[in-house]
Image (cartoon, rainbow, N blue to C red):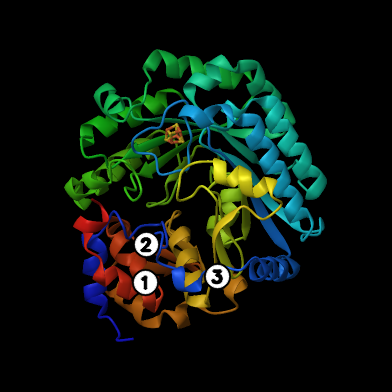
Amino acid sequence: MATIDLNNLFDKGMELHSIANTAYPLTPTSLKQYALKNENEIQKLLEKEFHAMNELSLYVHIPFCKTRCKFCEYVVVSGSEFDLKDEYTDAVLKEIDLYSRIINNDKYIAGFDIGGGTPTELGFRRIEKIVNKLSKTFSLRSEQVWSIETTPFNAISKFDELKDIYNLGFHRISMGIQTVNQELLKKMDREGNAHLYQKAVDAIRKAGYTQFNIDLMYGFKEQSIEDFKSTVEYTVSLAPEYITLYEMRYKLTQIAHDALDVTRAKVNSQYLVAYEILIQNGYMANYGKNTFSRIKNNHGTSDYLTSRVTKATPYIGLGAGAQSFGVNYLAYNQGAATKSISKYIKHANNGSFPIQDIYDLPEQEIMAKTISVMFYFGFIDLENFRKRFGKDFMQMFKDEIEYLKTWNLAEIKDDMFILTQNGVSHMSGVIPMFYSDRSKQELMNINAEKLLK
Ligand code: SF4
């Protein structure tokens, strides 16, 4: 494969900033040459993986939302499948059973999250069933920060259940506000207002949560810098422990075509404005990190996510469309493509792993995905990289690092590879430097108009 000039690669990443981001691979079919098709092969791969693994995290996906926000990139069901909560819960329990046959419960569980969708939409009893089953199968550790997600509506209407969920062991909770711009909310098929948010925050506090995160989004076509500033200022007034800023990732959303009208300069300015407000108000994060915390020595993310981003700890994703990332494999459960749960339920009921796609990946691909995810925090811990891959990051990417240092895009400090402020502003040019040879070529050949149509 011909070597691609780093300048060209950087420029292409910048041009395709809504594609060359922390989400890897570039398209749902990018890795198809590594796909396993045969049940036997899949079983063997999973057995081999979990035999060798000492540590892993768990994630359960709950895909229910009353309505689907237009910017949502996740597997979410509303409409007729919204009432299949019992069937879905049973399917998750069956999936846990399948893993229990190939994983000993002596593995160290580094973190546990329930995400969505809207997990609290499932109701306490069903959540409890899943947690009880997981506790029997894995050595879940209550001293860790388990995290769950809710919506402002759920936080108010399901207050008693929120308390029960806290008592079950979830001491971190995350709630999405995204934006306070009413017009933008309407365009995205989402509801919300200041009165509702305040009531939701009061309910969350009353239920006992002291590790509370609010999610915000930026990078929308119709969202000005001033507009995002108001959202951040308002959110600070609600005083959550953590605030997470998500840059809009357009791939696979109903508004993918909007990406072509959003400039990198606007997105960078929105992040900068938010960063300054948050730092002034006592929230902490290195420039480029998306979760800000006002608690000292606390990343603000759950143990599951912190471990996944900083150490590349393998994780099993349970539930429809959930992603699993092992030592040498990547898999997506049934539902990832269809954004529906019926196939997932059917597969689990048939007693086979409800996996839609599974890839046995070469090291270059595993590394590319790992590094893309590490950029969530804006830095790579070089010691953690050595532990994960048994290789030296500086040696492996000598030319790329030299290039990034020359252009003041990254620096090395205290055994960390850190993006500079300039590097964060050019993140989509930086990330492709660490892609596999295959995905570099793929990026160079992408036509944005076609991909985001
Ligand atoms: S509430 Fe969250 S998960 Fe549900 S549709 Fe909206 S963005 Fe997606």
Q: From the viewer's perspective, is residue 342 above or below residue 194?
A: below
What secondary structure is marked by label 1? helix
Query: Do the CB atoms of the residues marked 2 and 3 lie less than 8 Å apart?
Result: no
What residue is disc 3 on?
385
- Marks 3 and 1 sit apart, C-alpha to C-alpha, by 21 Å
Name the residue: 38% across, 68% down. 411
Pointer 1 local density, CA inside 10 Å: few below 14, some 14–19, many at least 20: many
Please state if 373 lies on the left or on the right of 358 as rendered. left
Front one among 380 and 451:
451
Query: Do the CB atoms of the residues marked 2 and 1 lie less than 8 Å apart?
Result: yes
Query: Do the CB atoms of the residues marked 3 and 1 lie less than 8 Å apart?
Result: no
- Front: mark 2 or 3: 2
Name the residue: 53% across, 21% down. 154
What residue is disc 2 on?
26
The image's mark for residue 181 is none
In the image, residue 232 lies at what x, y percent? Answer: 35, 31
Front one among 154 and 300:
154
What residue is disc 1 on?
439
Name the residue: 67% across, 42% down. 92
Which of pointers 2 and 1 lies earlier in the amino acid sequence? 2
Q: Is residue 407 visible?
A: no
Q: How many marks?
A: 3
Q: From the viewer's perspective, is residue 158 above or below residue 82?
A: above
Please state if 342 lies on the left or on the right of 207 as rendered. left
Front one among 75 and 131:
75
Q: Quadrant of ligand 1?
A: top left
Q: Examine the image and state in which quarter residue 141 appears.
A: top right
- Marks 2 and 3 sit apart, C-alpha to C-alpha, by 22 Å
Q: Examine the image and state in which quarter residue 355 appears.
A: bottom right
Please state if 177 lies on the left or on the right of 145 as rendered. left
